[in-house]
Amino acid sequence: MNTHIIELPITSSKLEELKHGDKILLSGVIYTARDKAHKRIVESLNRGLELGIPWKDTAIFYCGPSPVRPGKICGAIGPTTSTRMDSYTPILLEAGLKIIIGKGEIGDDVSRALKQHGAIYLTCPGGVSAALARCIVSCETFLWGNLGAEAVYRMTVKDLPCFVSSLPSE
């Protein structure tokens, strides 16, 4: 297993260096989205609306931050089960998204869509959400704040630990 330091946006040449199981220390701007946000994102894309998310330059992290404690940048940020987003993910990949981050398995349709669009699936360790929050440099509500933890958050991360779970070449 190799460790790669990746700064977003990811380049095609960097994608080609990755192997299944490699550790990634991810830095840059990412967006969070869980079930309700994914539903709204897909509805918006289907209506032709521009959401301001730079799909090809970022990653979507399947998580919803817990409330922020005083003196902290962000609450805990544990990943949620990726298969819950499977029905939405191919549409985001078609929009240009290159990296999805979650926990657990993904479905066959998502695996095919990753391959088709040259994207990757990273898993993030579960059960250490308070420790993961230390990787957050900034966090702001980006879309649909009324959804609380299910809103879309824009985060800048530094060395967020992930593992390569699915590649376009698989």
Image (cartoon, helix red, strand yellow):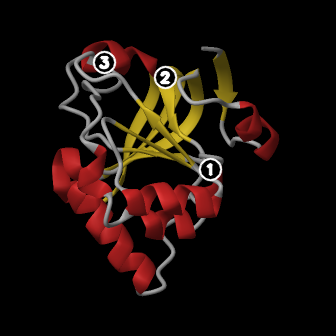
In the visual, does 102 lie left or right of 165? left
Disc 3 is placed on an element classified as loop
Query: Disc 2 versus disc 1: distance between alpha carbons?
Result: 22 Å
Q: Which of marks 3 and 1 is nearer the N terminus?
A: 3
Classed neighbour count for the residue bearing mark 1: other residues with Cα under 10 Å, few (<14), some (14–19), many (≥20):
some
**Image side of residue 56 versus residue 154, left or right:** right
* Circle 2 or circle 3, nearest the eye: 2
Dot 2: few (<14), some (14–19), or many (≥20) neighbours within 10 Å? Answer: some
Given residues 60 and 20, the one toward you in this image is 20
> Are the two marked residues, 3 and 1, in contact with CB atoms closer than 8 angstroms?
no
Q: What element carries label 2?
A: strand
Residue carrying label 3: 72
Q: Determine whether 21 is above or below 140 in the image.
A: above
Residue at the location (37% across, 68% down)?
41
Residue 154: percent from left, percent from top: 44, 44
Q: Quote the CA–CA distance across marks 2 and 3.
A: 17 Å
Instruction: Identify residue type, mark 2.
Output: Leu
Image quadrant where one finds the N terminus: top right
Q: How far apart are marks 3 and 1 (CA)?
A: 37 Å
- Which residue has dot 1 on it? 168
Label 1: element kind: loop
Q: Which amino acid does label 3 sit on?
A: Lys
> Which disc, if any, is residue 49?
none
From the viewer's perspective, tell me whether residue 15 is left or right of residue 23.
right
Quadrant in the rendering for residue 38: bottom left
Residue 129 visible in the current orientation: yes
